[in-house]
Amino acid sequence: MILITGGAGYIGSHTCVELLNAGYKIIVVDNFSNSNPEVINRIKKVTGKDFIFFEVDLLDQEAIEDIFNKYKIEAVIHFAGFKAVGESVEIPLAYYHNNITSTLLLCSIMQKFNVKKMVFSSSATVYGDTDLVPIQENSPLSATNPYGYTKLMIEQILQDLSNSDDSWSIALLRYFNPIGAHESGLLGENPNGIPNNLLPYISKVASGEINFLNVFGNDYPTKDGTGIRDYIHVVDLSLGHVKALNKVLRSKSIEAYNLGTGNGYSVIEVINAFEEASGKRVNYKITSRRPGDIAISYADPQKAQKDLDWKAMRSLDDMCRDAWNFVQKNPNGIGKTNLDKKLVISS
C-alpha cells in the first residue's frame, strides 16, 4: 500500500489517478483545507477503482499512527502542506508549524514502523531568485518567502535523515509550474478563493468571472517583455511521481529531480495559447513588476529523464485545452457533495 498525504489536492488527485492506473493500491489522507471531498469520488470515477480514504490532519499523530498500525504501508508520497506564497508572507508561523511539524511527525511515524521510502513534493522555489538557466539540481539553493523556506527546510531535514540512516530512499521532486487538468474534465485546479497561480486566473477572466488579468511587468529582457516560466502539464507531473515511486521502491538513496519541460513560455504566450484553446478573449492590464520576480526560469530535466525514465510529453496547447475543458465542465469549481460512504473508513 502507498500512503498519499494531501491526495485530494490538485497534484495529489492527479497522481492518485496515475498510481491507480499503474496498479498501485493506495491510502489517501487529506483534511480538505484547500480541496474538496468530491475530489475523492471523482478519482474513483476516472479510474473505476476503489481505495481507502481518511479525512485526517497530518498533525494528528495518533490518527496517522493508527493508519500505519492497520495497514502495511510500503512508501509515502507526501503532498500535504500549505502552498500559497503570498499567504505565507502574511502568516509565516502557520506555514512553518503546519508544513514542517507535520513532516517531522510523519517521518517519525515512518521511522517507528520501518517505512523508509518517500517521494516528497518539493518546488522550484528552493532555487530562489536564480537567473541562471536552465536550472539544474546542483544549482545553489535559497528561498524568498516562508513557503519556499518550508520546502527548503524539509529537503534539508530529509537529507539529514538519509545521512543518519542510509536505509532511507527519498526522491525530492522540484516542480516548476504545473497547469492543465485531467482530459476527462473531472479533475483540475480547484483553489478555494482567489487563485494564486496564472492559469486559474486566466481561466476566470476567460469565463467572465474576473474582468482582467494583471500582468506584472512587460520590461523584462525577454521576447515580449513578460516573464518566462516552465509550465508543465499536471498529468505529466503526476506520471513523474509514479516513476519516482518506482525508483525509491527499488533503491536506497536520496536524490532531487527537476520536473519541468525544459522550455520556457512567456505570460503573453500563455494568454495567447489560452485564447486559442478557449475561443475567448483574455483581457489583461500591464502593471509594475512584483518584488522578487525574475525574468526567466526553466528547468533542466535531464536528470529525471536519465534516472527515472520520465519526460514531459504534453504541449502548452494541451495544457490550455485541458484547463479550459475543466472550467467549462465545472463552472463553479468542484462542488461540495457527500462522500461515497464506501470510500470512508473511520480511524
Image (cartoon, rainbow, N blue to C red):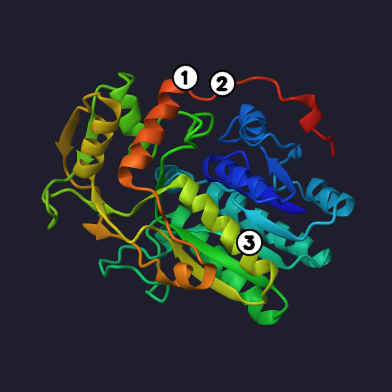
Q: Position of residue 130 (x, y in %)?
A: 30, 67
Which marked residue is nearer to the observer: mark 3 or mark 1? Answer: 3
CA neighbours of label 3 inside 10 A, class few (<14), some (14 to 19), many (20+):
many
* Callout 1: SS: loop
Per the rendering, the mark at residue 245 is: 3
Residue 335's place in the image compared with 75, above or below, is above
Q: Does residue 269 appear in the picture of this structure?
A: yes
The residue wearing badge 1 is: 332
Residue 104 vs residue 20, the one in the foreground? 20
CA gap, disc 3 and disc 2: 31 Å
Q: Position of residue 48 (x, y in %)?
A: 68, 34
Q: Position of residue 283 (x, y in %)?
A: 20, 27
* Callout 2: SS: loop
The amino acid type of the residue labelled 2 equals Gly
CA gap, disc 3 and disc 1: 34 Å
The amino acid type of the residue labelled 1 equals Asn
User: What residue is drawn where x is 77% and y is 53%?
Assistant: 1
Choose the circle earlier in sequence order: 3 or 2: 3
CA gap, disc 1 and disc 2: 7 Å
CA neighbours of label 1 inside 10 A, class few (<14), some (14 to 19), many (20+):
few
CA neighbours of label 2 inside 10 A, class few (<14), some (14 to 19), many (20+):
few
User: What residue is drawn where x is 65% and y is 76%?
Assistant: 162
Q: Marks 2 and 1: in contact by CB < 8 Å?
A: yes
User: What residue is drawn where x is 70% and y is 21%?
Assistant: 338
Residue 82 vs residue 275, the one in the foreground? 275
Per the rendering, the mark at residue 335 is: 2
Choose the circle earlier in sequence order: 3 or 1: 3
Q: Does residue 291 appear in the picture of this structure?
A: no
The amino acid type of the residue labelled 3 equals Leu
Q: Position of residue 164 (x, y in %)?
A: 69, 80
